[in-house]
Image (spheres, rainbow, N blue to C red):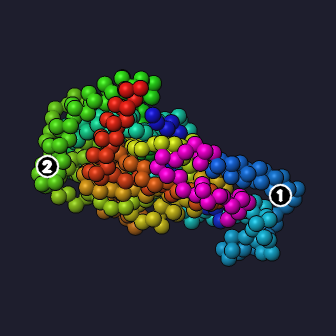
Amino acid sequence: MGCSSSIHPAIVTQPNATASLAAIPASSKSLTASGQTSEVGQVKQFIEVSTQTDETQKTDASVNTTVDSEKIDNDRLAFNDTTLPHNQDPQKHPITCLVQSKTTLATLNDQLYIFLNPRLSANPNSEEIQWILQDLDAQQYCMMIQQELLSIGPMAIQEAVNAMRKSQDLQILNQDIWMLLEQAVKTNDASYFIRAYTAESEFYKILNRKLAQQDLTSTIDLDAEEQMQLLMGTFFQQMDQMVSRVQAFQEGQPLPIQNSNESNWAKLFLRPLYMLLATPNSSIRFQGSTYRGMWITLDELKCYVEDTKFVCNKAITSTSKLRTVAQSFIDRVGNPSSEMLSAMFTYKIESYSALYALNVRDFSMIPQEEEVLLLPGVFFTVSNVQFIPPRSVEIELRSSLEELANMMSSSIGSLFSLFRQ
């Protein structure tokens, strides 16, 4: 099961933009990891109320559209002081107050945030691509990605660049990216792959789209017996390999390698990155909490509730060690859709999952953002989802060896339960 909508960080400024929403009942403030459809429905009701109020206020505001330069200046000052024009009650005029300074705020936002990391502030992709996988699909995908970790060889960089040269997807890349890739081959230094990914270009978008478009045998239409066969076949095929890798990782030993005939340039590009992380005692690995701020729809929220236990991302995910940086990407755009929720994701990276978390501060054009890249293959348990009135949500995702064991135990138990029905 997966979510086809694109979940990329959007930049939105929302000073008191949702004051018109009624106070949400206490019972719906916390959506547990097994969140119910009714809870999501309650959130939807509040958003619908906001939408109706927004349309009414916009109609009222459109009666007078004359805005002179003096009023724009006054609105800018009012926004800096209180986010509302003087002498207006935010409870009575929440949308009107925002409408009066939209033009100014849009201009200011473009100027103030021009240097923000484009990977953290990318606009949602219009394509219907399955970016996030859930539960059995997430487990199957992560096990498939394990093969990339098991297939890292001494020629990984050369193989990746050779495949990239042949790809029609990459013909539009500028020369700077190709120079970085060629330098990686020349020096056999995979850190140039990080520089290529974090460079100001279209490359990271093309790469992530290619990764998200990978074929996967979906389990959503399979019956219980077919799900059991698929999962157990993959599980036993890779269990011995995974155990040996965990042991090597914990002991600081080189990770075992197996042969592969992979030709997908995007997957081959990941291998040198995994190679950096697989180096014993690699300083580039990240463990701890990292954050990602964005605006999501109710459908995207459903990816993390309604009995979802596990999720994984199919593409590289840009996050920051600093919550304030993640929040800045929520706080940028001045006119979010009334049907969107601001979402703060907290990723808990522990133990073995550090093999998928790249601390790229030393390679980034904006080192102060403390960027951490989460590579495909790490799965997370949805440990907490909390709705914060009027229209915000906190989502905590955790990944560790304990979560890995729980995932395997839970999935096998669930499948046996379905099989008995």
Which residue in the structure is indicated by mark 2?
248
Q: Is residue 223 left or right of residue 5?
A: left
Position in image of residue 291 (x %, y %): 43, 59
Nearer to us: label 2 or label 1: 2
Q: What's under tag 2, amino acid-wise?
A: Ala
Position in image of residue 273 (x %, y %): 27, 47
The residue under the point 49% across, 52% down is: 32
Instruction: Tell which residue pokes out farthest to the front in this image.
Output: 420
Q: What's under tag 1, amino acid-wise?
A: Ala
Q: Name the image quarter holding residue 70.
A: bottom right
Q: Main secondary structure of the magenta part?
A: loop
The residue under the point 61% across, 60% down is: 26
Q: Is residue 52 left or right of residue 255?
A: right
Labelled disc at residue 61: 1
The residue under the point 17% across, 58% down is: 281
Residue 99 is inside the magenta segment:
no
Q: Provide the residue span drawn in magenta.
A: 16-41
Image quarter (top left, top right, bottom left or bottom right) of the C terminus: top left
The residue under the point 48% across, 61% down is: 326
Considering only vertical position in the picture, is 34 above or below 21? above
